[in-house]
Amino acid sequence: MLLYFRALPHLLAADRRRSHSLSVLLRPSFLFRGPIVLQGGKGPAALTLWMLFNCLFQTNMAPNSIHWFRKGLRLHDNPALREAVRGAGTVRCVYFLDPWFAGSSNVGVNRWSRFQIQNFRNFSNQIRLVSQEWKISRLTFEYDSEPFGKERDAAIKKLAMEAGVEVIVKISHTLYDLDKIIELNGGQPPLTYKRFQTLISRLDPPEMPVEPLSDTLMGCCVTPVSEDHGEKYGVPSLEELGFDTEGLPTAVWPGGETEALTRIERHLERKAWVANFERPRMNANSLLASPTGLSPYLRFGCLSCRLFYFKLTDLYRKVKKNSSPPLSLYGQLLWREFFYTAATNNPRFDKMEGNPICVRIPWDKNPEALAKWAEARTGFPWIDAIMSQLRQEGWIHHLARHAVACFLTRGDLWISWEEGMKVFEELLLDADWSVNAGSWMWLSCSSFFQQFFHCYCPVGFGRRTDPNGDFIRRYLPILRGFPAKFIYDPWNAPESVQAAAKCIIGVHYPKPMVHHAEASRLNIERMKQIYQQLSRYRGLGLLASVPSTNGNGNGGMMSYSPGEQQPGTNNNNNNNNSHCKSRFNPAEAIFFFS
């Protein structure tokens, strides 16, 4: 098994005798030596501790620093990295590529090829590593708010103290100190977004971003670079990590800090949006990856959330003549903080069982149905096109996420949100543990959101968004020949239309795997019973606004209108204007970064 501490060659100008240094993962033969051995440890956490403290075993009075990169893969607004270089003689930065993570089936090629490897290579164009004896006296890293990260870091701090190593930890992946929000709420995380907003309005504004690392800040911090530096520390290729790259298309989301900073400037050029805080209306182009999209860069820390926050603030004040911006301007950032706060003290946040904030729902176990959903074989073009885009590009629009999440869980398939979360974890570039789990609980009505009678229709929602069906033709080319009238429900197309499109439903493209109207009606009734039980046992008034079922038993949900053909039927007089109807406004629901 190979592990890597890979090199990050220098960004800063320096002559060949002096190189500012940062570093990344190594092969075992180079670093696995020294007196510190952890006994009884198993798994990635124990190995990480062992690897790190084999780096730290020799110390002296000289200020030699290690900066430990996890997230926060950037030079701008990186206070922990600044602490590493403060008065230091040498600085070495390490990144541990966890072998369990790199080899996991839950981490897809898009995640590594399209983004993380490019992140490493971007750093490789900036910073030079050394391979000398490390005599470390200072360790710095960015605060990790996730429960397993806090447990790991507590163990690291303990070992560092025993080794006589100073540890400096700085908050920079979130806008706020999450513990202060929880303290302000009586020791419990706020579980409604409204309450969260109330709490942060009572806190001081987020701290300003710190200066980017510069040659001046590096001062006399110098580390020699060995001749075999590239061989020992070069960024690993995807092939080395075991991924098949044959036929891999061009990256839609180039990785790295440089790209992130370019994108934020493009993002902020939309001055009208900032001035009025009007989110662009949903249309076919909204479904495609945007050159102003920021979510993967915030997730990996290539872009500082504080930099984004204050750039938004400055632009708003310029446009609005120094008026104070509303909290809604920072909505995307604050949703992220909300889920981080909810998850920080809950190690079971990504599970239903043992999770104190999650409703226990008896979901079905149906591996075959789950596979059809994950592999874009549901027979619903809107759902399958979204899942195809996700698999190809590692990203989908936030409302597309809503649609496929609802379909998998409470809308149609009645499969646990945990299964969907795992698929997103594998395929999404911006899959963040707290936000991913929290969003799936939200969208499945397992926590945070109880309006289970609102569902997304797998036909009508897409049709209203992209009436011509261009998105479907792009990601499901097998359906390219269908006219717009039938592109969202091709099972209703006459045989002559299917033949002309060179796609026979049930032969070249699957028939719908469920009858949506029946499945969603049944699932709403299931949810209603679950929440009625909760109301009885917990005294919750959750059902006060639940409408009674209407004439067709759908309770106002998105379903097929009476004139629309159901999946699996055919009618040559199909009415193109009939579509799923609902009072649900998706814009009111949770949204993700675009």
Image: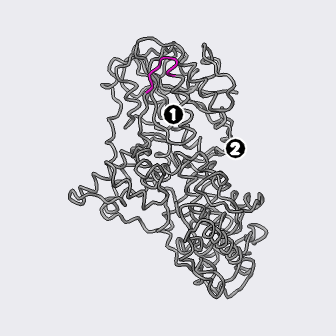
Earlier residue among tags 2 and 1: 2
Residue 553 lies, with reference to residue 502, above or below; the image says below
Q: Secondary structure at mark 1?
A: helix
Query: What segment carries the magenta color?
Result: 160-167
Q: Nearer the viewer, residue 352 or 286?
A: 352
**Given the image, on which type of amino acid does mark 1 rest?**
Arg
Badge 2 density bin: few <14, some 14–19, many ≥20, Cα 10 Å: few
Residue 117 horizontal side relative to residue 378, left or right = left
Tell me the tag on residue 121: 1
Counting from the top left corner in percent of width and height, residue 524 is at 65, 73
Whether residue 164 appears in magenta in the rendering, the answer is yes
Residue 502 lies, with reference to residue 134, above or below; the image says below
User: Could you tell me which residue is drawn at 49 percent across and 27 percent down?
Assistant: 8
**Given the image, on which type of amino acid does mark 2 rest?**
Ser
Q: Say which residue label 2 marks.
A: 105
User: Could you tell me which residue is drawn at 73 percent across and 82 percent down?
Assistant: 570
Q: Secondary structure at mark 2?
A: loop
Q: Nearer the viewer, residue 450 or 589?
A: 450
User: Could you tell me which residue is drawn at 70 percent across and 86 percent down?
Assistant: 572
